[in-house]
Image (tube, coloured by chain):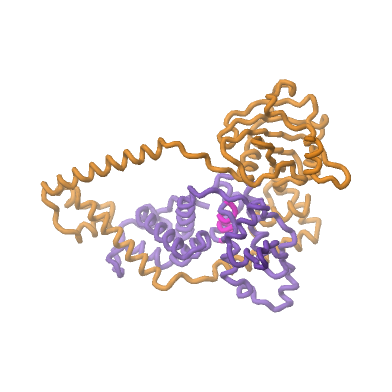
Chain colours: A purple, B orange
């Protein structure tokens, strides 16, 4: 896995017209090919469309500044994801860390594949995208970033450890705890994470911050 | 190897990759070879991964995002070009072959501004820069309250410390700082235990490390006692009955807090070895009851 220094991809290129003016053709091509993937990653990290757009924009502005360093167009997509992640982490640097005592490695979270298949559920449609984002939002950043690096950047746990400067064992633990949480929340056959019920209302289902408070109190 | 440790390893490794060749995962690979249930668990984990990954990617960006990005990028290029035009005229007109966008933008900007106006702008700008620098310096020098630490961060720091810090000859237990003496009613600390101070160990504070050997050739652990400069949240006030981390790099760990002291027990081995260092209450005693008893 590479760091956020891009490979070189073509420096002097013709300009291309865009609605707001003129941008270099390679940059316009990067936007066309990768903006959706960068936005998806940013949205999953941030949990809000506005922040995701900011992160996406910042990532492409950095790409703009470093465009003359981009040589390998095949790796540009991955490089943009790393840039987006770094922009997100920079945004969150001053945030107070959140305890995550309620996140545990849970063997019962792994769904029984045969029962799901026999029920005839469609793999993707079975997971509601809003519930998915709510479950991600419940994860503290220390867990959210590694697990999204795993799924979006296709990073191995050793890559993640290197990139985030963490011991590999810590990354293994965080990946498994984060995945257990997502499986419990989302996948058929997984045991639901215990929810706190306030005044007869399931607060964690309605309000992700309530789930964070639940982790804090456990 | 416990099922919990197996699941942690399966969750960490990417399907189809050769991470099982990693010596640190040799026991996982052996279990997968020998145990059909472990292979079935791996299959289920990979299946769950595929479903989650597909769901994570199954969303579309807002319509018009690409056009919006292109507009902003073009505007950013224009601004950098405008900044170039604020430099003295002979530099502003010089072509910059290394940055096509700046060249393009500078062509689109108005002709160079007159010298007197430029000097007024420079004077105002230098004033703004001076004020900004003063404010930044004040912010930098203003003491920030220490950021709280999480239990995770404490465990990370302790494991990192213990895996880096080779045991060296320490001092006799009897000479350990009295305010950092481990509670021998909660943790087994033999009389021949050695200790030493580790500077700037975690949370901006030094730590006292106790190197505990229960018996020659038996289980070994390091107990770190820290009085952290920053508050730590999410810790129990007694030793957990199970380690808080899976067994990785050959160690597991747990942390707890007593008063303003944080204790981290890093044990060489897994939960079985960890439990040997606890003084578990007998019968139906809970840790809280045990603690009340030993303190009472």
Say which residue appears at 29% left-offset and 58% top-offset: B77
Residue farthest to the right? B283
Percent position (x, y) of residue B126? 23, 42
Magenta highlight: main SS: helix
Q: Residue at x 48, y 61 (%)?
A: A42
Q: Is residue A147 inside the magenta stretch? A: yes
Q: Residue at x 64, y 32 (%)?
A: B165
Q: Which residues are magenta?
A: A142-151
Residue A118: % across, % down = 74, 77
Report the front residue among B125 and B97. Answer: B125
Horizontal relation, residue A106 to residue B35: left or right: left
Q: Is residue B144 visible?
A: yes
Would you say residue A9 sits in the magenta stretch?
Answer: no
- Seen from the viewer's position, the closer of residues A191 and A213 is A213
- Name the residue at the bottom extreme: A120
The image shows residue A73, relative to residue A172, as above or below, that is below
Image position, residue A181 (x, y; %): 66, 60
Query: Residue B66 appears in which quarter of the rendering?
Result: bottom left
B264 on left or right of A70: right
Q: Residue at x 66, y 35 (%)?
A: B261
- Asked if residue A195 is positioned above or below residue B138 in the image, the reply reads below
Q: Quadrant of residue B133?
A: top left
Pick the residue in front: B203 or A30.
B203
- Horizontal relation, residue B80 to residue B206: left or right: left
Query: Does residue A79 lie above or below B59 as drawn?
Result: above
Q: Is residue B169 visible?
A: no
- Image coords of residue A37 (percent x, y): 48, 65
């Amino acid at each position: 896995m590479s760091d956020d220094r891009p490979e070189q991809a073509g420096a002097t290129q013709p300009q291309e017209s865009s609605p707001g003016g003129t941008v270099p053709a390679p940059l316009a091509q990067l936007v066309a090919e990768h903006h959706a993937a960068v936005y998806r990653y940013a949205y999953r990290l941030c949990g809000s469309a506005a922040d995701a757009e900011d992160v996406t924009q910042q990532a492409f502005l950095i790409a703009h500044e470093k465009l003359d360093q981009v040589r390998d167009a095949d790796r540009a997509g991955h490089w943009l994801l790393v840039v987006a992640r770094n922009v997100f982490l920079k945004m969150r640097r001053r945030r107070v860390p959140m305890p995550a005592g309620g996140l545990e490695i849970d063997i019962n979270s792994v769904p029984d594949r045969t029962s799901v298949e026999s029920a005839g559920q469609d793999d993707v449609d079975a997971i509601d995208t809003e519930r998915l984002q709510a479950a991600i939002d419940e994860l503290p950043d220390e867990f959210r970033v590694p697990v999204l690096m795993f799924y979006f950047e296709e990073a191995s746990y050793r890559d993640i450890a290197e990139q985030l400067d963490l011991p590999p064992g810590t990354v293994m633990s965080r990946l498994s705890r984060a995945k257990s949480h997502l499986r419990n929340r989302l996948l058929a056959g997984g045991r639901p994470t215990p929810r706190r019920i306030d005044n007869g209302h399931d607060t964690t289902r309605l309000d992700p911050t309530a789930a964070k408070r639940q982790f804090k109190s456990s | 190897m416990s099922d919990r440790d197996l699941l942690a390893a399966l969750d960490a490794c990417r399907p189809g990759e050769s991470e099982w060749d990693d010596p640190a995962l040799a026991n996982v690979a052996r279990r997968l070879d020998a145990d059909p249930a472990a292979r079935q668990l791996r299959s289920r984990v990979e299946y769950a991964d595929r479903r989650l990954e597909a769901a994570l990617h199954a969303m579309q960006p807002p319509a018009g995002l690409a056009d919006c990005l292109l507009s902003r990028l073009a505007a950013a290029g224009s601004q950098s070009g405008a900044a170039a035009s604020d430099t003295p005229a002979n530099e502003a007109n010089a072509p910059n072959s290394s940055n096509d966008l700046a060249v393009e933008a500078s062509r689109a900007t108005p002709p160079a501004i007159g010298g007197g106006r430029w000097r007024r702008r420079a004077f105002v700008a230098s004033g703004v820069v001076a004020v900004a620098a003063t404010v930044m310096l004040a912010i930098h020098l203003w003491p920030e309250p220490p950021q709280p630490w999480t239990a995770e961060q404490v465990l990370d720091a302790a494991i990192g410390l213990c895996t880096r810090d080779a045991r060296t000859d320490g001092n006799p237990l009897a000479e350990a700082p009295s305010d950092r003496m481990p509670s021998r009613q909660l943790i087994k600390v033999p009389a021949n235990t050695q200790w030493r101070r580790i500077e700037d160990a975690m949370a901006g504070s030094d730590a006292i490390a106790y190197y505990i050997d229960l018996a020659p050739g038996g289980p070994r652990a390091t107990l770190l006692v820290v009085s952290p400069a920053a508050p730590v949240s999410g810790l129990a006030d007694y030793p957990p009955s199970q380690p808080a981390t899976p067994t990785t790099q050959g160690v597991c760990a747990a942390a707890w807090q007593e008063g303003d002291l944080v204790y981290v027990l890093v044990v060489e081995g897994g939960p079985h070895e960890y439990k040997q260092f606890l003084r578990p209450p007998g019968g139906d005693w809970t840790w809280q009851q045990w603690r009340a008893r030993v303190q009472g």
